[in-house]
Amino acid sequence: MLSQLSVKNLAVVEKLDLSFESGMSVITGETGAGKSILLQALNLALGHRSDATLVRHGKSKAEVSAAFDVFAQNKVQTYLKEQSLDEDGECILRRIIGSDGRSKAFVNGVNVPLSVMRNVGELLIDMHGQNEHQLLLRNEQQRELLDTYAQSAELCDALNHCVSEYNTVSNQIDELNNNQDLKQQQQELLQHQLQELEDAALNQNELDTIESDFKTSANASSLIEKATQVLNQLEHESGLNAQLLNASHTLEQALETDEKLAPVADLLNGAQVQTQETIYELNNYLSALSFDEQTVAELEARLSELHDLARKHNCQINELINAKDKVSAALDAIGGAGASLDKLQQQKESLAQQYHQQADTLSKLRAEKAELLSSLVTEAMQVLGMPGSAFKVDLAQKTEGVHYNGNESVDFLVKTNMGSDFKALKKVASGGELSRISLAISVVSSDSEYTPTLIFDEVDVGISGAVAEVVGQKLKQLSEHYQIICITHLAQVAAFGHQHLQVQKAQAKDGAQTTVKQLSDNQRIDEIARILGGSTITEKTRTAAEEMIKLSLKTIA
């Protein structure tokens, strides 16, 4: 539900902070006081189109923030989580409009595209007004409402899952049928590649070492020369090893005189041992190393062959076996295409049968509940001051085949006068009539999950007296399931509110200013008396207002 609305520098509003309660909130005020600015502010927070002219004169920007409690709204929380915008049961929509016409949108402090803000907004608030966009006018929303009313939403979801699988299988079949020539070419290429790789007699150990082996063999002559040179320097009669032995012997003699030389003697002995180990390893290296031009030539040819293969398969030499496995797997996949086609055809037929069974069940349930919904909404429309009107849920059959959401499209039709034809709800001309029709549908389907906050803007246009009282009753009845915000000019409707907000406009030095205040019980009586009798409140109108509020409480009780 909407819990807080803050507005700054928007048109005639300098600063406004409003708290909304659950139940039914009514908003009243003189004509031209600025009631519509509240709806404009909400629309901006819901991601609707902005206009630089809305920025208060002399200010650089306007700002609107709307806070919602979404703890119990699963749809809203799911969408916020999908967008990484969840905030522990709270949703804050913030919109900034600059005097240059640019705007920024934020959801829970995160800068988002307007489309995301609109998507969130449509899950939070449904506007029922003369010129407001209404979710109820969308055929998709009408279908969802019917399915929710009929308790067939889960069945529809299961059917859509079946349709999705059916379409996937159909696409796979089409791909197999349409690409046989291409697959034949691919098969021949893969067979050639596999044969080439198999003929190479790949060995992982060879692949890992061949480059280093070739480098060593190609440079064997130079390596032998350098290693021999070092060995001679170490092994010669006057070489390093002999010098270390003599030095070690001399130091051992000195050690007999001064034991402090022991660490130095240890180091020198260690150096001599390491030198001897080096001589041993060099001899082993030279005994294993030989220079053979034929061996070098063979390694070079083999390396060239492997380089060519690696280049063809866009990999390193040591990855060629893995490349071979991939080619083999791809070839197996193509080879099994024929068998797969038969299997896919069987799967498609099975899914089609499953779809038709589910669609038939869904169609029967929809038809039954569509008739009941039509009857109840028609009855409610009569009570709401629309005699001779009727409502009809039309189920039009789709073309033969497998369709998302079943075999029928859902369209809400109405006729507003006896003898007239049914028309689509979205084509109803009168805003007042449309608001009351929406109210009737909302009341009848109030047990269905819908947007948590409903706003009715002048739902009472063109009605008065007893009908107005019924509208008030229905709105309050609806507030048991939703948060209701109603802008009204009728005392009979305003009397049913749990919360009463009054809009006022006054002239200030820097221009007109609109303010909104929550009325106390006594102030509420005065406001309803003003609506009944005009600017001058008499004892008679005040008594009538007081009685009207008392009767509204008794009616609900």
Image: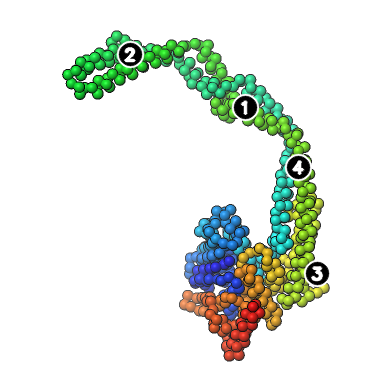
Name the residue furthest left: 257
Question: How far from the left and from the top, in percent, is residue 66?
Answer: 54, 65
**Residue beneath disc 4:** 347
**Residue drawn 33% across the image and 19% down it:** 274
Q: How far apart are marks 2 and 4 (CA)?
A: 80 Å
CA distance for labels 4 and 3? 46 Å
Q: CB of mark 2 within 8 Å of CB of mark 4?
A: no
Instruction: Pick whichever, 224 or 99, lies toward us.
Output: 224
Q: Residue under circle 1?
A: 324
Please, what is the three-letter code of the amino acid marked with disc 4? Answer: Gln
Is 399 rendered above or below residue 481? above
Looking at the picture, which amino acid does disc 1 mark?
Answer: Lys
Mark 2 or mark 1: whose residue is earlier in sequence? 2
Task: Rate crowding at label 4 as few (under 14), some (14 to 19) or many (20 or more) other CA atoms within 10 Å.
Answer: some
Cα–Cα gap, marks 2 and 1: 50 Å
Element class at badge 2: helix
Nearer-the-camera pick, 350 or 434: 350
Q: Residue 234 got which mark?
A: 2
Q: Which of pointers 3 and 1 lies earlier in the amino acid sequence?
A: 1
Q: Of helix, strand and loop, which one carries label 4?
A: helix
Q: What element carries label 3?
A: loop
Q: Which residue type carries mark 3?
A: Asp
Q: Which mark is residue 421?
A: 3
